[in-house]
Amino acid sequence: MKLIVVAALSTMTVLSACGSKPTAPAGMKAGVFVSYQCEGGKRLQARLADDGSTVRVRHEGGYELDRKGDGVFEGEGFKLVAAADGALELMHHGKPVARNCKSI
């Protein structure tokens, strides 16, 4: 009996993981660069990969960031975080470089 319950729970876990697609940060689109206006007159652009696994960021250069969690992307010392209000924050080695970025 325990084996049947464990097998059923395992199957449900696998199916729920396969059926759930990660959500994109507000304003971001797959395959299209979206411009963001940030505090202090800074700007950045971001493009979500078709499968949602990476984000390409343009800000004083170009960077490919890997999804680390829902709304969090990291790579090359950069971290892009999506806030609940739809704004983005870009950090480099833990220091903010662009805050309160909203799509325009």
Image (cartoon, grey):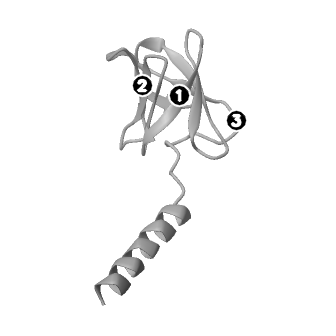
The image quadrant of residue 49 is: top right
Secondary structure at numbered mark 2: strand
Tell which of 2 and 29 is nearer to you: 2
Residue at 55% of width from left, 41% of height from top?
27
Residue in the image at 41% along x and 72% along y: 10
Q: Which residue is rendered at x = 37% and y = 42% of the image?
A: 85
Relative side of 24 to 96, left or right: right
3 and 2 marks in contact (CB < 8 Å): no
Residue corresponding to mark 2? 79
Q: What residue is shown with label 3?
A: 32
Q: Which residue is mark 1?
A: 65
Mark with earlier residue (1, 2): 1
- Give, as a three-letter code, the residue at label 3: Val
Q: Secondary structure at mark 1?
A: strand
- Tell me the amino acid under the disc marked 1: Leu
| Disc 3 packing (10 Å; few <14; some 14–19; many ≥20) | some
How far apart, in angstroms, are the residues tagged by discs 3 and 2?
Answer: 20 Å
Q: Position of residue 9 (x, y in %)?
A: 37, 76
Nearest the camera: 28 or 100?
A: 28
Whole-angstrom CA distance, mark 1 to mark 2, is 7 Å
Measure the C-alpha gap from mark 3 to mark 1.
Answer: 15 Å
**Amino acid bearing label 2:** Lys
Quarter of the image where one finds residue 44: top right
Query: Which residue is rendered at x = 42% and y = 25% of the image?
Result: 79
